Amino acid sequence: MELVEIARVEYSLQEIASAVTAEVIGDRDMVISGVAGLETAETGDLVFAESPRFLDSALRSRASAILLTTELAAGARAGLKSLLVVLQPRLAFVQVLRLFAPIQHRPPGIHESARIGDNVRLGVGVHIGPNVIVEADSVIDDGVVLLAGVIVGEGCAVGAGTVVHSNVVLYPGVTLGRACIVHAGSVIGADGFGYVPIGNGLMKVPHLGAVEIGDEVEIGANTCIDRAKTGVTRIGSGTKIDNLVHIAHNVTVGQACLIIAQVGVAGTVTIGNGVILGGQAGIKDHVSLGDGARVGAQGGVIGDVAPGTTVSGYPARPHQDKMRELGSLTALPDALKRMRAMEKRLAVLEAALQARRSEDDASGDPAEPIGTEGAERAG
Amino acid sequence: MELVEIARVEYSLQEIASAVTAEVIGDRDMVISGVAGLETAETGDLVFAESPRFLDSALRSRASAILLTTELAAGARAGLKSLLVVLQPRLAFVQVLRLFAPIQHRPPGIHESARIGDNVRLGVGVHIGPNVIVEADSVIDDGVVLLAGVIVGEGCAVGAGTVVHSNVVLYPGVTLGRACIVHAGSVIGADGFGYVPIGNGLMKVPHLGAVEIGDEVEIGANTCIDRAKTGVTRIGSGTKIDNLVHIAHNVTVGQACLIIAQVGVAGTVTIGNGVILGGQAGIKDHVSLGDGARVGAQGGVIGDVAPGTTVSGYPARPHQDKMRELGSLTALPDALKRMRAMEKRLAVLEAALQARRSEDDASGDPAEPIGTEGAERAG
Amino acid sequence: MELVEIARVEYSLQEIASAVTAEVIGDRDMVISGVAGLETAETGDLVFAESPRFLDSALRSRASAILLTTELAAGARAGLKSLLVVLQPRLAFVQVLRLFAPIQHRPPGIHESARIGDNVRLGVGVHIGPNVIVEADSVIDDGVVLLAGVIVGEGCAVGAGTVVHSNVVLYPGVTLGRACIVHAGSVIGADGFGYVPIGNGLMKVPHLGAVEIGDEVEIGANTCIDRAKTGVTRIGSGTKIDNLVHIAHNVTVGQACLIIAQVGVAGTVTIGNGVILGGQAGIKDHVSLGDGARVGAQGGVIGDVAPGTTVSGYPARPHQDKMRELGSLTALPDALKRMRAMEKRLAVLEAALQARRSEDDASGDPAEPIGTEGAERAG
């Protein structure tokens, strides 16, 4: 079958080298079964290194082969990993990714069971699957794929080449950029969570704002991104969001961020570019995270995080400090025992010295109790 | 367009004053873009104050204007915020909310693709969207809106004026009260999580109970509320539940609670009225939370919480204590070092005093080591 | 109605005894409203005990009656609970479970609105509900139930007797074993979360692997299980997964595990047999958990867990230790105060002894400051 020849699960290193015009240093017959980032690479993976620091990590990773430039290859200790040497590593790596990419063989066309509302603008080459609903006044741009059961509310816009998986719900007025992927079951544009207590009740605050998702954003399965109260909840281009994430109303997320599964971001949080939020982390409302900030898994952020800073724990603090604190906690039960012992030893010493002083006192010195002064001051 | 005149995104303060018969103290031309609670208010928001304490918070909030009574207005320091003075502030605030509320312009009618089972009772003015399934013996009361793809299982009841968003699934036997809102993708009535270990396997425990949701309850997107094993999983009227929340079997939640995103409530938990559960908090099975209890974000509650108490952290403890403990943790690594130093200083002192005693001893006193007695007892 | 006679919500203990050929010791008229595990049993429940240890727990549980063997019954203190005595307790307990099991009265047949793709193999007695999509080349085995709105991607396999609830999405190439239950809104087979940073951007890593779910697996509502990058994400037979759980790419879960609501398992984690993950727990990528390991609710596991070990907290540590550490934390704020007091008392003592030494010194002894030596070494 032709499709199988275009995208395969395995290639020899030599086959890849031929496809991207690279030179192999090492094992030409080695089987490469995928590409990966440096931290998640497994045996069989090809990884990408574009600087000495990344080469270092690549050499220590589980990967089988490294794609890199002639210059970097010169410095790499031969024999540790097989090398794929190219002139333009970024271009070559994207070509390799394409070798492994699954075929999107959704033919253009609108399934007979789909319902397209009034005044919807459909681009060229659009695929609309069974039971899809596109409500009035929406724009579905060229090459968009809406899979079975997707619901696009009134006045939405879906950018060219974006793929929306089954049963995703876009509430009215949501904008998705170009080349996005939204996985099954996600809900974009539900009302933010806002109420005003009046007497014993809670009155709902109207949420009239929008959601705007940039280009090349990927959103995992069953993730929720709420509409703004007024204004816009905004996800920057190139940002990737995992499964079961909650993004509240009026949040702004920058570009090329990684938001890992089950993260919760409360209302009106501002997140810079290139930020990484670890799995199950939570960000308090109104907090700001600077460019390149990182939050460890399960971290609970209750104050602003400076650019480039890594924090973790609850309440989140600089990661190194937090790990030292949590490490020291293991010594605490024993330390408390030793402290009680020391207090007794101190009392014994104080009594002993007091006794000596009293002896001296008998010979005329002024008597003051020893040691209590500091204790009183501290208490 | 008429619709636009009924609900707008912005009004001048004078326009609002005219609509609710209020007096303006301050800037009549100020643009008001929404209403908000005191804690989440932003510039452009109108907030509500019905007591001196709330007025205080309102004056310190980010809000631009405050709706209040003549009495309270008399005490407010002029000039800080613009004031909207009314006789009946609760009534007026609800009127203002309505000015901003989005139009629900779903016309009554049943889409041709919807499937209505046998013996379903449909009220007046019901809207049933495309691909909706309503199974046998269900009751859909007056003015209910079931949006595209909603599935209502056998024998459910949906109260008057309730809106169920797309792709929500109600399992058989679920009851929703009046004027509820259920956001897209939520699942109500799935089996509780219960198994009996038999040998190396796990036998499923049948879940034959129901779910009953009160009136004016709002349920966020992709939230799950499980049916009871026997009896009822119950959510009280006026309670608001955010996105991606898990409510297990046989839980009872009181009235007017706020359950924020990604909270997990385990089986047979009892929650009073007016309780607030912060984002990502977890409540252990069989625990009780009294009226007005609050759990901080990410808190892990493993024991009962008294009425009106605020707890946080894991295991959850009174919030002030927990914050002091977590604060003191930052001092622990250094404290452990100082403690080791003190132990050495103590040993030096003990040795010195011992040496002196020994000198005395040489002159006939009974010799006992100093300081070890307390240490032994403590160890 | 006949159906009602087959499955009821309540039976007298004598009725149950007759149905499973058991002898009653105790109250024959007692109303039994369900079966339960020992830890979650309530009044009205029947529980199961097959060893003295389990009998002990059963006697202490909230259950009203215990199903057990003649031998165990002999040792049980009469009168505490009613006993149902049988020869083969496992067989009898399964028979009792069936008495309470809800009727699956879905008649075989394919709804007219369902869409079945080319080359789909349908078994005998299959029920396919309205708006279900089964894409090409899938196998739907005997007795499978696919409820309204389920979407089965290309090349999936669903084993005999499996029930898939409404709006579940199976991406292409997912395999479900026999007698599984998948609750509404779950998504199986979405792409894993993997990207390669290139310059300021993030390139998507293709996910070409599969998901294989064993037999008798139950998956809760709105849970997500991602496909592997290459290879397989695997859930072992008999494992039960609760609502809103995230299982990342390339995870392997063993048999008969319990994964409670909102747990997150990161990429390439390996979990043994009989493992229990408490609610909201998180497991770091590449970690291994041995057979029978347990992770407490909200635990954050960042390193391997040995078989049979129970860990909790973040970072997760042996549960007893962790609880002692967290308990000792409550004493820390006070301990720090007392420590500062002790430092002052020490300084006072050192000064006093120093003063005495200086007196002695005046009579010729070598003068060395007391106590600083240890402090310096420790600093």
Image (cartoon, coloured by chain):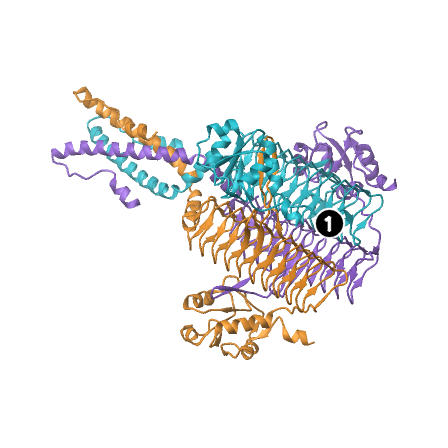
Chain colours: A purple, B orange, C cyan
| Residue A150 seen in render | yes
**On what subunit does the disc labeled 1 rest?**
C
Quarter of the rendering containing residue C6:
top right
Q: How many marks?
A: 1
What residue is rendered at 50% in x and 59% in y?
A: B255
Q: Where does the N terminus of chain A fall, quadrant-wise? A: top right
Q: Up-down: is B70 above or below A90? A: below
> In the current view of this chain or complex, which residue is farthest to the right?
A1
> Which is nearer the eye, B161 or A55?
B161
Residue labelled with disc 1: C150
Q: Up-down: is C327 above or below B368? A: below
> Which is nearer the eye, A130 or B55?
A130
Q: Is residue A289 left or right of residue A112?
A: left
| Secondary structure type for disc 1 | loop
Residue B164 % position (x, y): 65, 60
Residue C286 % position (x, y): 63, 35
Badge 1: residue crowd in 10 Å (few <14, some 14–19, many ≥20): many
Q: Up-down: is A351 above or below C165? A: above
Residue A170 % position (x, y): 69, 58
> Which is nearer the eye, B138 or A314?
B138
Q: Amino acid at mark 1?
A: Val
> Which is nearer the eye, C185 or C100?
C100
Residue A165 % position (x, y): 74, 51
Q: Where does the C terminus of chain A fall, quadrant-wise? A: top left
> In the current view of this chain or complex, which residue is farthest to the left?
A363
| Residue A242 seen in render | no
